Image (spheres, rainbow, N blue to C red):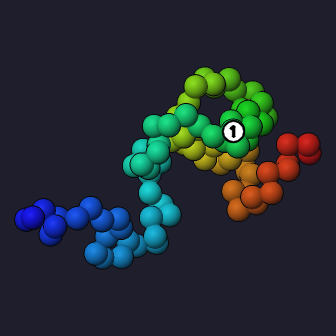
């Protein structure tokens, strides 16, 4: 019964600055999973606008990095979460 003191926990005993909002996508727990449908759709829009072709089998982390890069290149603001700008 010595293992009762070593229970699995979540979180951290000390606060994380900015709640981990600036964490590198490569450090995400799910970063190696396939990109989400929302990432795929938005990345498709950004890549078309930039005249780029990207692999369709990106991970969540890879997709996030490409999205950030293409947003910077296009001047899109990432604060708009409506996701309806594809028609404009």
Say left or right for 28 vs 53: left
Which residue does the image show at 47% across and 45% down from the upper left? 30
- Residue 17 x, y percent position in the rendering: 40, 73
Residue toward you, 36 or 51: 36
Direction from residue 86 to residue 68 in the image, left or right: left
Residue 47 vs residue 6, the one in the foreground: 6
Percent x, y for residue 48? 77, 30
**Quadrant assignment for the N terminus:** bottom left
Tell me if 29 is positioned left or right of 54 in this view. left
* Residue pictured at 69% horizontal, 56% vertical: 78
Q: Nearer the viewer, residue 3 or 28?
A: 3
Judged from the image, the secondary structure of the residue bearing numbered disc 1 is helix
The quadrant of the rendering that contains the C terminus is: top right
Q: Residue furthest bottom?
A: 14
Image location of residue 83, percent across then percent down: 79, 51
Give the quarter of the image for residue 58: top right
Q: Position of residue 85 (x, y in %)?
A: 85, 49
* Name of the residue lying farthest toward the left: 2
Residue farthest to the front, as pictured = 1
């Amino acid at each position: 019964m010595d293992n009762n003191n070593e229970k699995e926990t979540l979180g951290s005993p000390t606060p994380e600055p900015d709640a981990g909002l600036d964490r590198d996508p490569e450090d995400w727990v799910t970063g190696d999973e396939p990109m989400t449908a929302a990432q795929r759709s938005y990345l498709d829009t950004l890549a078309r606008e930039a005249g780029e072709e990207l692999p369709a089998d990106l991970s969540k982390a890879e997709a996030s990095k490409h999205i950030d890069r293409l947003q910077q290149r296009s001047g899109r603001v990432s604060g708009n979460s409506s996701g309806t700008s594809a028609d404009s």
